[in-house]
Image: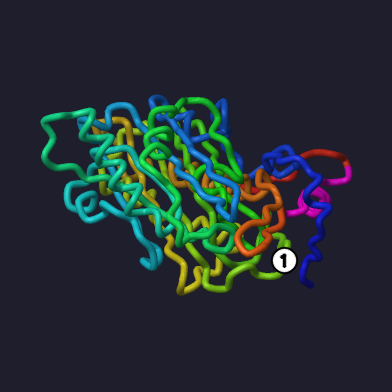
Amino acid sequence: MLLPVTDDNRLQSPRRVRELGVVVGTLPTGPLNAITDVPGVRVGQTTITGDGVNTGVTAIVPDGWEATLPAAVAVGNGYGKLIGTTQVDELGVIETPILLTGTLSTFRVADAFVSWLLDRDPRATSLNPVVGETNDGHLSDIRRRPITPAHVHAALDTASATLPQEGCAGAGTGTAALGFKAGIGTASRALTDGTVGVLVQANFSGVLTVLGRQVPAEPIDSDGNSCMIVVATDLPLDSRQLGRLARRAIFAMARVGSDYAPGSGDYAIAFTTSRTPSYADRDLRTPFQALTESVEEALLNSLTMARTTTGFQNHTAHAVPHDRISRQHQPADGRSSGRSAT
């Protein structure tokens, strides 16, 4: 049965999924339960709203990017724009921060990004900006391409190690997923030897599934419209091992109900702040679990932290009703439910 959605959802306050009694997996989170729990990783965002526009920029800025960091990209479905992937594949490193935005603004963001980079290094003659996107055209006048260099530079210059704003923020301002308003989400897991953190830009189709239980809704866009997943860690992994993490990030979308529609561009990019790879493949089991749990929780946070939004041509994406999630997943004795991610 499809979930009836009403304007009452406008009255609820954004809450992270753990506040609704939903605990994903068994591993402990970092202090913020965010990608910024990875030491040296910062996030900055610029949000643009009004006059039919709901879009923005999200920047993931790791310390030490100027000297390159090990990285890898995984493509679940290549119906999208992720600028800079071929060089990441070829060399196994990123040499810039990672930016996310709306589809038709990808190229403006990349150009403004290059200007910001050139200003920092007057001797540079070659740069490989990494810019990803999802299509926010349902809620934003995407053809206007409203993002300016000032928006891009502000996201980069204000990046901090605090908890990133989730839901209707930055590149997630106009996105929707699984029949509801979505946006930016983040989560992390703390391991004995490091941290795994993720940030997602959620904008894909399917039936919302929370710890195995469906919360169905009318689809907003049957074409899919994509998901970007950024994975950060300080574990000493090489680019091949980071590729294994990135692929599993895309696998984890299925846990929340993605149908991997043919019109969806599903991408993950993983990097580490460590430059001394020393991890054995046989020891990747727990990092894989940490990654899967973090992606699942970040995607759920992208939904429960979003607000009902009316935008371009009076289109509306409703926030997921929190009571439907908390009521279905909170046992009678009041303890939080959970599920192992092994």
The image shows residue 157, relative to residue 219, as above or below, that is above
Q: What secondary structure characterizes most of the magenta part?
A: helix
Q: Is residue 274 magenta?
A: no
The mark total stands at 1
* Residue under the image location 52 percent in, 72 percent down: 223
Label 1, secondary structure: give it. Answer: loop
Residue 229 in the image: state x and y as whole percent: 45, 50
Picture quadrant of residue 213: bottom right
Depth check: 237 or 220 in front?
220
Viewport quadrant of the N terminus? bottom right
* Residue under the image location 61 percent in, 40 percent down: 26
Q: Residue furthest right?
A: 332
Coloring scheme used:
rainbow
The image shows residue 314, relative to residue 160, as above or below, that is below
In this picture, residue 235 sits left or right of residue 16: left
Depth check: 46 or 246 in front?
46
Picture quadrant of residue 335: top right
Depth check: 227 or 11 in front?
11
Is residue 321 visible in this depiction of the protein?
Answer: yes
* Residue under the image location 37 percent in, 31 percent down: 234
Q: Disc 1 residue type?
A: Pro
Picture quadrant of residue 255: bottom right
Residue 316 in the image: state x and y as whole percent: 68, 60
* Residue under the image location 70 percent in, 70 percent down: 218
Q: Residues within 10 Å of mark 1 (few under 14, many from 20)?
A: some
In this picture, residue 309 sits left or right of residue 146: right
Is residue 342 visible in this depiction of the protein?
Answer: no
Magenta region: 320-332
Residue that badge 1 annotates: 216
Residue 55 in the image: state x and y as whole percent: 52, 50
